[in-house]
Image: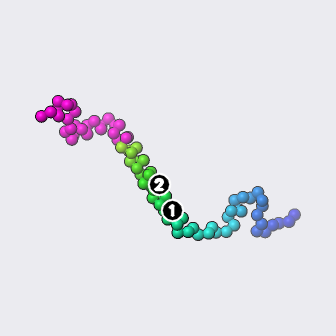
Amino acid sequence: MEEEEGGVDKEDVFLAFAQGPTPPRGTLRRALDKAFFIFLAIFLTLLMLETLCKLLCSLPWAMFGDWLLGIPQNEEELEL
């Protein structure tokens, strides 16, 4: 039985891709990657803030916020 030294089996796909280092990305691709990650971070932050706002507004103590701020509840209170 022959031993292959340094050879890759045809079925071994993962080692076939890991033979050498990947070539460096160009400046345009790096800039696009950075812009994408910044966009992704801002988008996810806004989604989390929206969810947090909806969660906090749905809590039962949220109705006391209007009372603490002195915001009138009825139209009669709005009239001078």
Q: Main secondary structure of the magenta part?
A: helix
34 within the magenta span: no
Is residue 27 or residue 8 the one in the foreground? 27
Is residue 5 or residue 13 the one in the foreground? 13
Please, what is the three-letter code of the amino acid marked with disc 2? Leu
Q: Position of residue 34 (x, y in %)?
A: 48, 62
Which residue is denoted by mark 1 in the rendering? 32
71 within the magenta span: yes
Bounds of the magenta span? 54-80
- The residue lying at 40 percent from left, 50 percent from top is 46
Local SS, label 2? helix
Is 41 situated above or below 6? above
Which residue is denoted by mark 2 in the rendering? 40
Q: Quadrant of residue 25?
A: bottom right
Labels 1, 2: front one = 1
Please, what is the three-letter code of the amino acid marked with disc 1? Leu
